[in-house]
């Protein structure tokens, strides 16, 4: 293969950082994404994201006892609120609903997890920055596992397994922490690891 051929050969897309390895869960597909991102839908459904100190963020969430229609309506409100806040994930407690439901949208994965349970994390960790929609204007530096796996139900009650790598794993662990009443600041080694986002800096992607 010539040098010219190497230069013009299209690069393979990077592997998804969130992957369903078992099951075929209901997702936020392109149609729902377009509908739930529309200005009129957002205006009618988006709510303010709750901020650190709000009691709903600091207690474990409960098992949802909702119909599929009710869960889908909740997820739509969560997604609209996440879009307004420029997030890539959100947990139901962040919009004031103390139920174990999260959206994980790294690389527009559109994953909805009901009662997610982390069943494995890698022993290898890396230091990373982390932001949160519920802690505006701040970011932390902490260690997170490089990979993780969880099991959950989708909105129809179908079981599935999700694997995350690097930022995908970070999102999984961040969102499931929310369901246990934890924020990333609870995992910092010291106050010195919490930083203010400077005006000229881009705030770390938040969930």
Image (cartoon, rainbow, N blue to C red):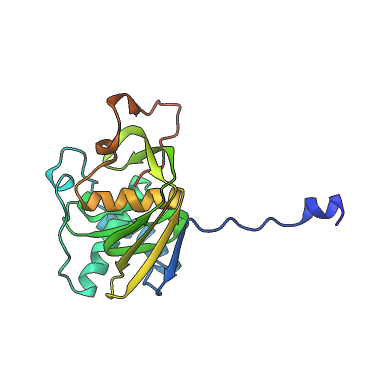
Give the vertical position of 120 relative to 71 (above or below): above
Q: Can residue 42 be seen by looking at this rendering?
A: no
Q: Nearer the viewer, residue 191 or 137?
A: 191
Determine the image quadrant of residue 25: bottom left
Q: Position of residue 85 (x, y in %)?
A: 33, 46
- Hey, which residue is sitting farthest right in the picture? 2
Q: Position of residue 96 (x, y in %)?
A: 17, 51
Residue at point 23%, 68% (across, down): 71
In the picture provided, is 171 more to the left or to the right than 117?
A: right
Q: Nearer the viewer, residue 139 or 40?
A: 139
Q: Position of residue 108 (x, y in %)?
A: 45, 58
Residue at point 41%, 72% (across, down): 22
Q: Can residue 193 be seen by looking at this rendering?
A: yes
Question: How many discs mark residues in the rendered view?
Answer: 0
Give the vertical position of 133 relative to 6 (above or below): above
Quadrant of the rendering where the N terminus is positioned? bottom right
Determine the image quadrant of residue 150: bottom left
Residue at point 39%, 48% (across, down): 170
Q: Position of residue 207 (x, y in %)?
A: 34, 47
In the picture provided, is 156 more to the left or to the right than 121?
A: left
- Hey, which residue is sitting farthest left in the picture? 55
Residue at point 24%, 37% (across, down): 186
- Hey, which residue is sitting farthest front in the picture? 123
Determine the image quadrant of residue 205: top left
Q: Nearer the viewer, residue 55 or 47?
A: 55
């Amino acid at each position: 293969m010539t040098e010219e051929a190497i230069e013009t050969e299209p690069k393979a897309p990077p592997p998804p950082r969130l992957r369903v390895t078992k099951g075929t869960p209901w997702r936020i597909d392109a149609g729902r994404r377009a509908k739930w991102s529309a200005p009129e839908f957002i205006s009618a459904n988006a709510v303010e994201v709750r901020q650190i100190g709000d009691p709903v963020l600091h207690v474990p969430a409960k098992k949802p006892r909702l119909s599929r229609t009710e869960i889908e309506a909740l997820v739509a409100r969560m997604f609209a609120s996440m879009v307004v806040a420029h997030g890539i994930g959100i947990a139901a407690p962040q919009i004031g609903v103390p139920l174990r439901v999260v959206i994980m949208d790294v690389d527009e994965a559109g994953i909805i997890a009901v009662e997610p349970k982390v069943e494995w994390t890698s022993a290898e960790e890396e230091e990373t920055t982390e932001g949160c929609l519920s802690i505006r204007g701040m970011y932390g530096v902490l260690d997170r596992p490089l990979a993780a796996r969880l099991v959950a139900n989708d909105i129809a009650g179908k079981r599935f397994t999700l694997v995350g790598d690097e930022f995908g794993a970070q999102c999984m662990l961040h969102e499931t922490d929310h369901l246990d009443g934890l924020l990333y600041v609870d995992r910092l080694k010291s106050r010195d690891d919490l930083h203010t986002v400077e005006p000229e800096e881009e705030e770390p992607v938040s969930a």
